Amino acid sequence: MGVDSGRLYLAVGVGGFRRYATYRAATAAGIFTNTVFGLILVYTYTALWDQRPQLGGYDLAQAVTYVWVGQSLFKTLANGGGGVEGELMERIRTGDIAVDLYRPADLQLWWLAADLGRSVFELLARGVPPFVLGALMFDLALPTDATTWLAFLVAVVLAMLVSFGIRYLMALSAFWLLDGTGVAQMVMFVGWFCSGMILPLNVFPGLLGEVVRALPWSALLQAPADVLLGQADALGTYAFQLLWAVLLLAAGRLVQGMATRRVVVQGG
């Protein structure tokens, strides 16, 4: 990728950031929603950890910290939808994807850059405020050294890549299904369960726990949270996240090639 191409994708990413920055009311509503859900989960976890101290290897402070990490990353990683995949699926359905294919840019990298811009905005604008509020209201198990925070941020960036890889493959299904709503809903529910958004994956017992922790969704929330909480080796976590990112992006490029060779323009 040359300098000019790098500038192009940087501009796309900046455009994605600015675009989502215009939705101020939606951002404020999202901060409120994430904070309320965070409070609900905190009190639920508190009752659960009172009965089962050290559940999943976490003490109560770590479990509460996990809740606020999850709320800060929920929209950042588009676990419940709301990323660029919705727009991409709509462009495939209407046939506007043909215009994208004529651009002097790689389709996958274009949408990746746009989604990364969105993710950075969501992290800063919608992710940080609930986390700060949680830290002010509860006793969180936060690291005191900058190195751990930096390691956590690296894991978050890698989680963004894995998240995009999953959602890009989901969006490409619209080339065959045209209406990908069902696939999107299925991926959303699987993502909630398998990413640890409902409960930390560390608490899942036996074979179920081993399976969900090996799936790519565990690279989204569980992996960064464990780095922040000192429960996982950063380099091992990065290797796991990078493996899934490479596999998913490579699969996306393969499916993209299959799909664009048989594009059928729908609608106008």
Image (cartoon, rainbow, N blue to C red):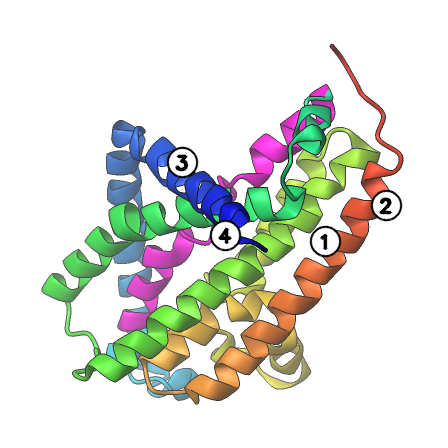
Q: Could you classify mark 1 by the number of other residues whose Cα lies within 10 Å: few (under 14), some (14-19), or many (20 or more)?
A: many
Of the two numbered discs 4 and 2 on the same chain, state the one appearing first in sequence. Answer: 4
Q: State the residue position of label 1.
A: 252
Furthest-right residue in this view: 262
Q: Distance of mark 4 from mark 2, alpha carbons? A: 29 Å
Q: State the residue position of label 3.
A: 15
Residue 43: x, y in percent? 27, 63
In magenta stretch: residue 128: no
Furthest-top residue in this view: 268
Relative to residue 149, is residue 202 drawn left or right?
right
Question: Which is closer to the viewer, label 3 or label 4?
Answer: 4
Q: Amino acid at mark 3?
A: Gly
Could you say whether the residue bearing mark 4 is in a helix, strand or loop?
helix
Q: Could you classify mark 2 by the number of other residues whose Cα lies within 10 Å: few (under 14), some (14-19), or many (20 or more)?
A: few
Of the two numbered discs 3 and 4 on the same chain, state the one appearing first in sequence. Answer: 4
Of the two numbered discs 3 and 2 on the same chain, state the one appearing first in sequence. Answer: 3
Question: Residue, x 66% and y 41% (percent of image)?
Answer: 107
Question: Residue, x 42% and y 85% (percent of image)?
Answer: 234
Residue 117: x, y in percent? 41, 46
Q: Amino acid at mark 4?
A: Val
Q: Distance of mark 4 from mark 1, alpha carbons? A: 24 Å
Q: State the residue position of label 4.
A: 3
Question: Residue, x 67% and y 34% (percent of image)?
Answer: 181
